[in-house]
């Protein structure tokens, strides 16, 4: 007997992707009885589920952000590569390389393998396990930066730009907008790798997740709160804050700050100008155009489903290479879900 078509057992519903035989949703958009969560960003990890299956790190981050109960009435940690069976569906998690704990969801049912990527990147990141391609029949991929204009530079080269600016303006604070989960910790770790061992100052909203990263085994070096620091201490210092705080009165305590923003969207200079960003840092936690297409090819998937992003461009590119492709058009993932949501870009 031939394998059933994937859409007969993995369906698009208003709540999100639903595995029929396993009776679970993947990153559902509203509270459901059973959810498998790829990572802890707000547009993928919603509160109120009856049961949540995810990596141990994702569950810890969800508890920190949502509260113990809101993160799921029953929480089941699953190690990467650890297989289990739900309703005849063999399921396991594979590293996604997006943020700490992020995972792809791999499923096998009646001889067919489907992999749901969640958000992912292919660039190295000292704060999380790197992406691992999983061979499959159907690949469900994100498409945040799925346009040919998005070819991200090496993150290390962007950090070199930051260090050059710090050397050029030693009397000025460098205020970097970073999303609270994933981006801020990655920027800190990249700075440490590049040799910046001075204290890094944090907006109060970033400190709890940085401390949790450290508790989960990711060293970040000396971190200090901005509150209580003098303007003299902040002169020449690196200061991290959520993007929404860049233009706040809060930043007035800094020493003539150079304003930076770490985001894949900074490749679009008009976005940087619109936000008054003096030093755009193109540091993305998502795969760019080339990486998205290369990943599709590496999976060997004969069929690709594309979601949350520039779906049509990636569908067109895959189709031209002989891959069956379609856009899922799921609504609710990405920037509209909150500034630390789908981008963390």
Image (cartoon, rainbow, N blue to C red):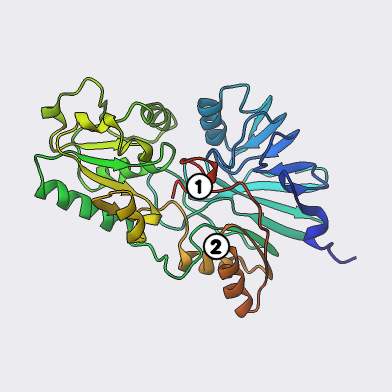
Q: Circle 2 is placed at which residue position?
A: 310
Q: In the image as oriented, which residue stretches furthest toward the right?
A: 1
Above or below residue 311? Residue 215 is above
Q: Which mark is residue 274?
A: none
Task: State which quarter of the image contains the N terminus.
Answer: bottom right
Q: Residue at x 39, y 49 (%)?
A: 125
For label 1, count other residues whose C-alpha is less than 10 Å away and answer few (under 14), some (14-19) or many (20+).
Answer: some
In the picture, residue 203 is in which quadrant? top left
Query: Residue 161: where, in percent of width, then height?
Result: 21, 55
Whichever of callouts 2 and 1 sits on the residue coming sooner in the sequence is: 2
Name the residue beneath numbered marker 1: 335
Q: Residues within 10 Å of mark 2 (few under 14, many from 20)?
A: some
In this orientation, which residue lies closer to the viewer: 140 or 189? Answer: 140
Residue 299 locus on image (x, y percent): 60, 65
Secondary structure beneath dot 1 equals: helix
Q: Position of residue 174 (x, y in %)?
A: 21, 41
């Amino acid at each position: 007997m031939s394998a059933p078509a994937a859409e007969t057992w993995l369906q698009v519903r208003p709540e999100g992707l639903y595995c029929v035989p396993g009776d679970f949703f993947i990153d559902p958009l509203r509270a459901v009885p059973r959810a498998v969560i790829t990572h802890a960003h707000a547009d993928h990890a919603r509160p109120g589920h009856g049961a949540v299956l995810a990596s141990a790190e994702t569950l810890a981050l969800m508890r920190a952000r949502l509260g113990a109960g809101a993160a799921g009435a029953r929480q089941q940690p699953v190690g990467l590569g650890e297989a289990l069976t739900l309703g005849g569906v063999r399921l396991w998690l594979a590293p996604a390389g997006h943020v700490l704990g992020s995972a792809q969801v791999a499923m096998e049912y009646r001889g067919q393998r489907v992999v749901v990527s969640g958000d992912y990147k292919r660039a190295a990141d000292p704060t999380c396990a790197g992406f691992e391609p999983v061979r499959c029949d159907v690949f469900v991929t994100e498409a945040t930066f799925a346009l040919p204009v998005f070819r991200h530079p090496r993150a290390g080269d962007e950090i070199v730009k930051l260090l050059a600016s710090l050397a050029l303006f030693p009397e000025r604070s460098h205020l970097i907008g970073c999303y609270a989960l994933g981006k801020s910790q990655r920027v800190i770790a990249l700075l440490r790798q590049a040799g910046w061992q001075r204290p890094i100052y944090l907006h109060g909203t970033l400190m709890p997740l940085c401390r949790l990263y450290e508790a989960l085994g990711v060293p970040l070096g000396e971190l200090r709160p901005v509150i209580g620091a003098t303007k003299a201490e902040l002169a020449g210092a690196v200061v991290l804050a959520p993007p929404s705080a860049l233009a706040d009165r809060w930043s007035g305590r800094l020493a003539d700050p150079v304003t930076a923003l770490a985001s894949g969207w900074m490749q679009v200079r008009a976005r940087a100008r619109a936000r008054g960003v003096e030093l755009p840092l193109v540091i993305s936690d998502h795969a760019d155009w080339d990486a998205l297409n290369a990943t599709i090819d590496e999976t060997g998937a004969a069929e690709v489903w594309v979601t949350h992003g520039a779906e049509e461009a990636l569908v067109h590119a895959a189709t031209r290479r002989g891959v069956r492709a379609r856009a899922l058009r799921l609504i609710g993932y990405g920037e509209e879900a909150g500034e630390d949501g789908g981008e963390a870009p």
